[in-house]
Image (cartoon, rainbow, N blue to C red):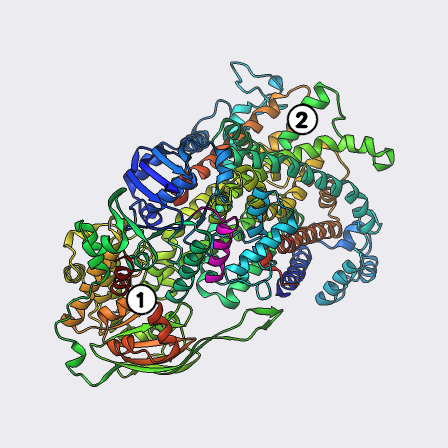
Amino acid sequence: MSLLEIDNLSLNIGDQPILKDIDISVAPGEIMGLVGESGSGKSLTALTIMQLLPFGAHTTGRVTLGGIDILATDEERMCLLRGKEVGMVFQEPMTALNPLKTIGEQVAEGIRWHNRASRAEAEEQARIMLDRVGLPAEKFPLSRYPHELSGGQRQRVVIAIACALKPKLLIADEPTTALDVVLQVQILDLLRDLVTENRMGLLLISHDLAVVTEMTDRITILRRGEVLEAGKTAETLSRQRHPYTRQLAQASMHVPQRPVSPAQEKNHTPLLVVESLTRDYPGSRTAWLRHGEPLRAVDNVSFSMLAGQSTALVGRSGCGKSTLARMILALDRPSAGTIRFRDETITDKREHELKLARRGMQAVFQDPYGSFDPRQKVERLVTEPLHLLEKAPSRTERRNMAEDALAEVGLIPSDLDKYPHEFSGGQRQRLSIARAIITRPKLVVADEPVSALDVSIRAQILDLLADLNSRLGIAYLFITHDLTVARAITDDVMVMHAGRIVERGATKEILDHPQSEAAQALVAAAPDLHRALARKLQEQG
Amino acid sequence: MTLHASLLGDRSASLLRRALSNRSFVIGLVIAVAVAAVALISYVWTPYDVTRLVIADRTRPPSLAHWFGTDHFGRDILSMIMVGARNSIAVALVAVGIGMGIGVPLGCLAAARGGMLDEAVMRLNDLVFAFPALLSAIMITAVFGPGALNAIIAIGIFNIPVFARVARAGALSIWPREFILAARTAGKGKILITIEHILPNIATLLLVQGSIQFALGILAEAGLSYVGLGAQPPMPSWGRMLFDAQTRMTVAPWMAMFPGMAIAITVLGFNLLGDGLADILDPRSRRRQ
Amino acid sequence: MIAYPARRIAIAIVTLVLASIVVFTMLEIVPGDPARIMLGMNASAEQVAQLRHQMGLDAPLLLRYLHWTGGLLKLDFGQSYTYSVPVIDLVAERMAVSLPLALIALALSTIIAIPVGLYSASRRGGTGDTIAMGTAQLGVAVPNFWFALLLIYLFAVWLHWVPAGGFPGWDAGIGLALKSLALPALALALPQAAILARVARSALIEVLSEDYIRTARAKGIPRRAVLWRHALRNAMIPVLTIMGLQFAFLLAGTIIIENVFYLPGLGRLVFQAINQRDLIVVKSVVMLLVAIVIVVNLLVDLSYALVDPRLRGRP
């Protein structure tokens, strides 16, 4: 008999339908993957099982957990189930813990509540649980507060809370999306071990097919609130019976066509030269007017890039790659070292002396929503870099340039009169690119430009970037933690670790034969659908 | 994220619909407009002349001739309330103007520059915050003697750090956004960015704070003129009218009733307006609906 | 991170010094010679000069400032120009009325506001919440001195429960003294309680939408318990901030309310002093009140560290 059985579940919030006739089941000890793009209703499915839906939600159908009909259970009895029979791990570890309570209190709280255990007993169990998730009491005493832990450590605490009472079902909603790839592997391993140890059922919600393939026994693919396909993981993903499944799988493995690798069309003058660049941040204050050890975010970094060359800068979160990018973009000043762009030293310039360099160097940012002023129209937003021209263009000239830029990224002139909120995430990233290329720059620094996008959109944006690279000869400095993206679009890779560049070489070479420890860890941890699927096929026959 | 952006960018038609379906906003707006209208009408017409003392008619209870009754000099209380509205509105408006005019640039500058300048502005804020409007008014009156201007200056000065804080906090939340980075890569300086991007994005915050400070200004002005630190007789003011009413509570309670209600309704109106505006313009409030 | 308390204390001291400079400069530029005021118009120029010397008024500005602040530290505020008694005596006598009044009002408003805020937040959108918040909205709008007049009319004039004004002094017995402070405290407290209840409610609602509240609920802790265990303490920070600010308003309010009830507090003292141009009293009272405001805000800042572990170092 199944542990969790969802039959014909429909969910409306207000009069808006969110889920339509969903069927999902999870057996004890089984890992079920729930896959879908943003807005598919994955998270609300989880919250339905927890009965923690937002106000105004209305459900029909049947959800049973260990034989108990959850939709018919009142709040009081539901409180007895939550934490005890079903636990949940959330996406954002930074905000999931109460900042004012110690981790010990937070793990012990559920134990005390459900088992009526004494404080000492509960704390003892909490200690064991925290030890189990990799936070031994010698190094992480129960009296630690959340702000004293890193993101990965906090997620371990959240897992400890969810598993403290060995629930029969664990729901994990994008548990690793906010973490870097190396932490992702650690957390996923932990979840898998806990499931095996306690014969828990796990409902793993993710947008990442590679992760789901690696982890799950069966998967359910959700789109716009409907189940499109469900079945054994290997079989479902290899047969790809439903066109959407195929589309998802292909988009996840997508590599853009790059007709001629422009780096080979030689242009030997270096475009960008970075020499022994260092950036220190003052340490946190330890006393009045006294600072702790300065934090070295970027440590003596040197490299150069050729025109038209597409280079990836990869590394774990916090390795200093974004700080480096900001210094190259002259948004931050280095503590030491120089940056030369097209033979012009930019590190000692004042803002008004940077116009020429800025014209040749633009940026695309990660967040397609945050990178536009919501109060301005697209025309104004896309033409903002024209501020850098020596002679201010006339109105019609601006309009023409904006139309050209939009055409380059596959948007139409009438889009210029819209506001950014009228566009989807992928379209906005196109706008972002249009803005970056309007001054015909030689270098575009792109900071995780596709990591906030769904896989199918991501594939399109990668195609666009590859196309612009070959047509306009724009060089990219591509900052990413995602090796699939690096492999897809770059010629060269630089691996950054603890502020230093520890390895550099041709993309394929490094990704296939990483030398440094940091690179090896990244490669080993990178989720790879091909590899995962091959392994799963072997397992599941 | 999606929500946030789409709400911030939400435009006229739906905004208006939301505004008109917000009860607080509508009631607040009606009261605010009514009070402003009364003050304006008082320039061209009042039921009676408030400068003429008619001793024969003194302390008359409300009647058809004098809807709100008369005071101890026989002046018509309705007329005095109408004229008093001018004073209240003028003081509150100018005080908000002072607070915004000085506080917003200071707050924006502190957020844009950071470092020592930010520290200096914040310390200055602390200093001014230590002087509630009443204490400033006491000092100013002690030095320059009583007058309506004292109230304006005292309340205005206290408004400066209020707006500086709101502007600074708002600006600090906008500065790290990626569209600001984009503007910087477009070579725009801090002042230009503040004008083009920061100010439009904190305007709604300032508007909400403005209506709250306006309401507080009305209250503070009434308090100051009540203790004699604000408008001076014969200029009618709501606070002063209450002072006059105090000793006559037993014989002429209406003298205290109506000016007090005028203050309370005006303050209520602007508070509701502020609440309503915050509800309409705050992206999070829609999520709650 | 011993830095936080040390930093707040340092900031408070700097603010105090700056405030004393402001008060001193403001009241130094006053036209009119205190010595002349004290001696009256008939005094000879010599007499005036002598008194000026006696009072130290002929010393250089900086020296006078240092003398004044030095005196403040020793609680020596100088001599009143009109009463010719030490200002500290006048102030101390009046403080015995004003400070208890402000404190009672603060306590009263907190006791009323926090439960109302909690109730409203936990039943958001319900009838109780609507009524409570409607009342609060009204309470915020009512000027406290008008409210005081209404209270007098109701309880003193009509019901004769309490005296309409005046203060018998603490010597007359605590009960009697408290009785005459009851209406003033109520008049001060209720409008403040309205503000505080609104802040408490919105702070709680804000906190209740945080992720960690969902984590707690996912543990199986019922809503009510989550409100007490997780939300309340997190919501304390904005509530404390407002309470600190409120104390400044309460002090100001006290000065006004004392006039309504004819209470012999600091407010009455300062208005008399303004009328009699007894500027040293004005200067002292203003400085004292400013100092109280600064110290209270410092206490609020320090109490954040008690609530929030992020602001305190590990022991």
Q: Is residue A512 above or below residue A382?
A: below
Q: Which mark is residue A278?
A: none
Residue at horizontal 74%, vertical 43%?
A: C99
Q: Is residue A161 magenta?
A: yes
Q: Residue furthest right?
A: C171
The amino acid pointed to by label 1 is Asp
Is residue A318 magenta-colored? no
Q: Give the numbered dot on residue C151.
A: 2
Screen quadrant of the N terminus of chain A: top left
Task: Classify residue B23 as left or right of residue C166.
Answer: left
Local crowd at mark 2 within 10 Å, few (<14), some, or many (≥20)?
some
Q: Which mark is residue A482?
A: 1
Image: A279 above or below C68? below
Q: Are marks 2 and 1 on the same chain?
A: no
Residue C127 location, x and y as percent?
A: 50, 26
Residue C92 location (% of width, % of height): 80, 47
Image position, residue A128 (x, y; %):
57, 57
The chain that hosts pointer 1 is A
**Looking at this view, is A146 or A215 the one in front?**
A215
The amino acid at mark 2 is Leu
SS for tag 2?
helix
The chief SS type of the magenta part is helix
